[in-house]
Image (cartoon, grey):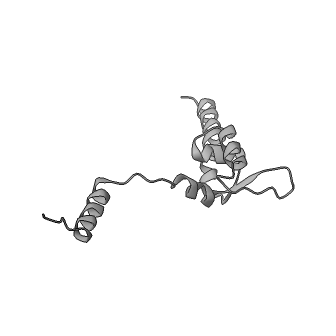
Amino acid sequence: MTSPELKELADMIADNLVPRFAVFHKDILSIPEAAMYLGVSEGYVRRLTSELAVRSYRPGGKMLYIERAELDRYMRQNPIKSMADINAEALVYCQRNPRRRI
């Protein structure tokens, strides 16, 4: 590769990747940034805010912002239990409710 090609490649990387990684260091995100952070469309993020599933802020009455911690909380809803968790719950249940023999 020639020097101009390398510079063009470096510029392309800087233009495309740096903004994407910057999202992970910000505490307050705009709708496009929140969509990029979650890996969903902007419309889906707007629907989450309109359904009040995620708390949002409108400081000037126009732009909509969401805290990254709020998005993390939303993503951690409804966890799927691992087999170890299920077995531990079953063991506790069996210990608390011994089987009655007739």
Residue 75 image point, x, y percent: 54, 52
Front-lying residue, 98 or 35: 98
Res. 36 visible in picture: yes
Residue 3 image point, x, y percent: 60, 33
Front-lying residue, 52 or 56: 52
Residue 37 image point, x, y percent: 60, 47
- Say above or below: 4 vs 27: above
- Say above or below: 52 vs 36: below
Q: In this view, does 45 lie to the left or right of 81?
A: right
Please tell me which residue is depicted at 58% across the width and 34% down the height of the picture.
6
Please tell me which residue is depicted at 69% across the width and 38% down the height of the picture.
43
Front-lying residue, 44 or 78: 78
Q: Is residue 18 left or right of residue 95?
A: right
Front-lying residue, 68 or 90: 90
Please tell me which residue is depicted at 31% across the width and 59% down the height of the picture.
85
- Say above or below: 91 vs 36: below
Q: Residue furthest left?
A: 102
Q: In this view, does 72 lie to the left or right of 45?
A: left
